[in-house]
Image: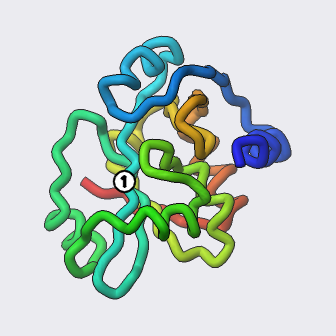
Amino acid sequence: MRQSVFDFLDELHIQYEKLEHPPILTMEEGKEVKRQLNATSCKNLFLCNKQKEYFLLMYPENKKLDSKSISRQIGSSHLSFARQEDMQCLLHTTPGAASVLGLIFDMENRVRLLIDHEIAETEYIACHPCINTCSLKIRMTDLLTVFLPAVKHDYTIIK
């Protein structure tokens, strides 16, 4: 999977800095990676509603999830965490490694990307290439203006 991500970014001429590290399972463990990359890290939450619509939420690491507010903003019924099996099927990754980069595998465009406004305004984002033993530093504008159009995904900014 991860080589597919690197190849895709290279094809798009998106520059990235790569850092190999032990598996990261918590935001606390990711603080050193964030420091080394000098990039904003975020929670990547894979959510769904009762209608089985899927959402990937890029959310600030220190912000408490307010699923009711997010549901209202996007016009959705109650949001909850999606099943691990669905994440594996749609994004080809597992909890702890979810990333916007997994959208390259969502060929049917079943996952809607939600980005918190604080994350959208950052210069560089740190994200996993669908595995939690590596992190990439990527310019946010490259994700929004090059990567997302290439994978045919729109995004919604939330507050």
Which residue does the numbered mark 1 point to in the structure image? 45
Where in the figure is residue 72, as x and y percent of width and height?
A: 19, 72
Residue reaching furthest to the right? 11
Give 68 or 140, whichever is nearer the viewer.
68
Q: Is mark 1 on a helix, strand or loop?
A: strand
- The image quarter in which residue 131 lies: top right
Where in the figure is residue 69, as x and y percent of width and height?
A: 16, 64
Q: Residue at x 43, y 60 (%)?
A: 56
Give 64 or 147, whichever is nearer the viewer.
64
Tell me: 13 left or right of 93: right
Tell me: 94 left or right of 149: left
- The image quarter in which residue 104 lies: bottom right
For badge 1, the amino acid type reads Leu
Q: Which residue is drawn at 48% across and 67% down?
A: 85
Where in the figure is residue 22, as x and y percent of width and height?
A: 52, 22
- The image quarter in which residue 156 lies: bottom left
Q: How crowded is mark 1: few (under 14 residues within 10 Å), some or many (20 or more)?
A: many
Q: Residue at x 36, y 23 (%)?
A: 29
